[in-house]
Amino acid sequence: MAESQAHGKHVFLDFVGYEPQSEADGAWMLDLLERAVERSEARNVHAHVAQFDGSVSPIGFAAVVLLDESHVTAHCYSEKGWLAIDCFTCGESDPSVIADFIQTELEQSMPHLNLKQRRVQDRFLHGEV
């Protein structure tokens, strides 16, 4: 079987102990995601956040920064303190740069935040050299 090459990487971060930083914590998170992208080689092409008030979905938010290289997202169940971040880039952009910035900023803002998992997965596997 031929060795596979990867054209992208995906970094997954799962946290517990998330603490809302404001009434509109989704907007706060979207700002953090956009600042992380600005410090990387990735290019932000669109950003959006949906804040959930608990009437239809559980209280929390979903935030996304669409990149020309792929995406950075945050999904949160605020009342449970659960936060999932994923950073996916292809080509030359390194998603670890984005994930590192986000993780550092979150840990500085939330002393009780606990990283339960950080995983890196190769993406766009192919056989070309």
Image (spheres, rainbow, N blue to C red):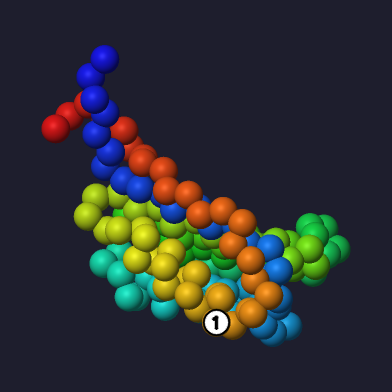
Residue 28 visible (yes or no): yes
Does 96 sit left or right of 22 as displayed?
A: left
Which residue position holds label 1? 108
Query: Which residue is rendered at x = 59% and y = 83% of the image?
Result: 109
Q: Inspect the image, locate mark 1, and give the three-letter code of the amino acid beneath it.
A: Gln
Q: Position of residue 119 (x, y in %)?
A: 48, 49
Q: Where is residue 91 in the image (x, y as percent from the top left)?
A: 24, 50
Query: Which residue is rendered at x = 79% and y = 58% of the image?
Result: 57
Viewer-proximal residue, 122 or 24? 122
Does 128 sit left or right of 79 as displayed?
A: left
The quadrant in which the N terminus is found is top left
Q: In this view, does 3 lie above or below 7?
A: above
Identity of the residue furthest to the right in this view: 55
Residue 24 visible (yes or no): no
Identity of the residue furthest to the left in this view: 129
Query: Which residue is rendered at x = 32% and y = 75% of the image?
Result: 39
Does 41 sit left or right of 89 as displayed?
A: left
